[in-house]
Image: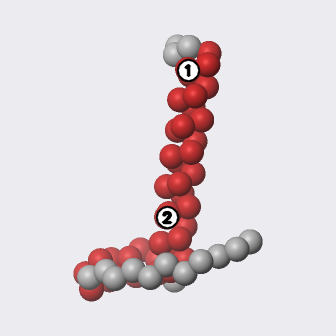
Amino acid sequence: MDSSVLSLRIDADLHDRLRERAAKRGMSVQDYVVRTLIRDDFDERFKTAVDETEKFYGAA
């Protein structure tokens, strides 16, 4: 699996909130952010698939 580097500049308050949320899950901030992005991407792709299915079969 290829990977790329993404660098973000965020304010200290946001970083603190992310660190707290990540710590509750036993994760690093980096892992927490990546998992959040993956989940959001999945949600968007899933919604698109549902919308396309509804178009194909007709909305109920």
In the picture, the quarter occupied by the N terminus is bottom right
- Which residue is drawn at the image coordinates 55% and 67% (left, top)? 35
Side of 11 relative to 46 (left or right): left
Residue 53 appears left or right of 40: right
Q: How far from the left and from the top, in percent, is residue 25?
A: 52, 74
> What residue is shown at x 47% (from left), y 72% (from top)?
33
**Left or right of residue 58: residue 8:** left
Using the image as rendered, state which of residue 5 and residue 50 is in the foreground.
5
The mark tally for this picture is 2
User: Taking the image as drawn, is residue 25 in sight?
Assistant: no
In the rendered image, the residue lying farthest to the right is 1
Mark 2–mark 1 Cα distance, whole angstroms, equals: 29 Å
Q: Is residue 49 visible?
A: yes
Q: Residue at x 61, y 25 (%)?
A: 53
The answer to the question of whether label 2 and label 1 lie on touching residues, with beta carbons closer than 8 A, is no
In the rendered image, the vertical position of residue 51 relative to residue 20, given as above or below: above
Q: Where does residue 17 sit, x and y in percent of width and height?
A: 33, 77
How crowded pointer 2 is (Cα within 10 Å; few <14, some 14-19, many 20+) is rated as few
Name the residue type under label 2. Answer: Thr
Residue beneath label 1, please?
A: 55
Q: Residue at x 58, y 42 (%)?
A: 46
Q: Position of residue 59 (x, y in %)?
A: 52, 16
Element under disc 1? helix
Mark nearest the camera among 2 and 1 is 1
Up/down of 7 relative to 35, above or below: below
Residue 36: image tag? 2
Relative to 12, residue 31 above or below: above
Depth order, front residue of 57/16: 57
